[in-house]
Amino acid sequence: MSIPKPLVQLNQFFIIITVLLALLAAKWLLLLPFLVGVVTLATKRNPIIMAGKKLLKKPISSYQMEDRDQQFFNQWIATICIGIAFISFLLGYTFVGYVFSIMVILAAGVALMGYCIGCTIRYRYMMWKYKRKKHAV
């Protein structure tokens, strides 16, 4: 199954905006993308993407599609990093909080420009698993 690219981009914009606002205004705002990520991973339904479907003007099938499994992998990475950032800020590890927050902003920003860091990580992981399995036989 696939997800229309404009909806993936909407989710990326949501992550960038909320994490940036959290860094500029109030760190608790990191809870917004974190909770959306947790809900997405638990239910396999992203609330931002679900709401965004109403904004699409053309039939879903007419859009360029993104791999659903890849998007869930990317959501795992983003949710973990945002969670680490939030906990770091809570514990007073401000530098770590900023590092993980900025990593998320950069990864989502670069993805909007066409390069998916999560895709590279997943591809290399899958190749590693394949080679390991191949040599085990």
Image (spheres, rainbow, N blue to C red):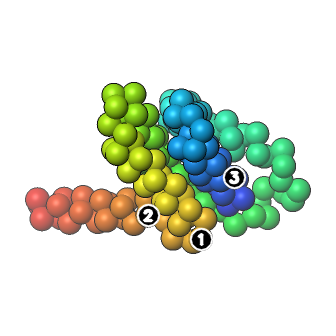
The amino acid pointed to by label 2 is: Ile
- Image coordinates for residue 133, horizontal then vertical, percent: 19, 59
* Marker count (numbered): 3
On the image, which quarter does residue 87 sit in? Answer: top left
Cα distance in 3D space between marks 3 and 2: 17 Å
Of mark 1 and mark 3, the one earlier in the sequence is 3
On the image, which quarter does residue 126 sit in? Answer: bottom left
Q: What residue do we see at 72% from left, 59% from top? A: 6
Of mark 3 and mark 2, the one earlier in the sequence is 3
Residue receiving disc 2: 117
Residues at marks 1 and 3 touching, judged by CB atoms closer than 8 Å: no
Q: Nearer the viewer, residue 53 or 15?
A: 15
| Residue neighbourhood size for the residue with mark 3, other residues' Cα within 10 Å, grouped as few (<14), some (14–19), many (≥20) | some
Q: Nearer the viewer, residue 128 or 30?
A: 30
- In the picture, the disc for residue 10 is 3
Up/down of 86 relative to 18, above or below: above
The amino acid pointed to by label 1 is: Met
Residue 36 in view? no
| Residue neighbourhood size for the residue with mark 1, other residues' Cα within 10 Å, grouped as few (<14), some (14–19), many (≥20) | few
Cα distance in 3D space between marks 1 and 2: 11 Å
- Image coordinates for residue 116, horizontal then vertical, percent: 49, 65
Residue receiving disc 1: 113
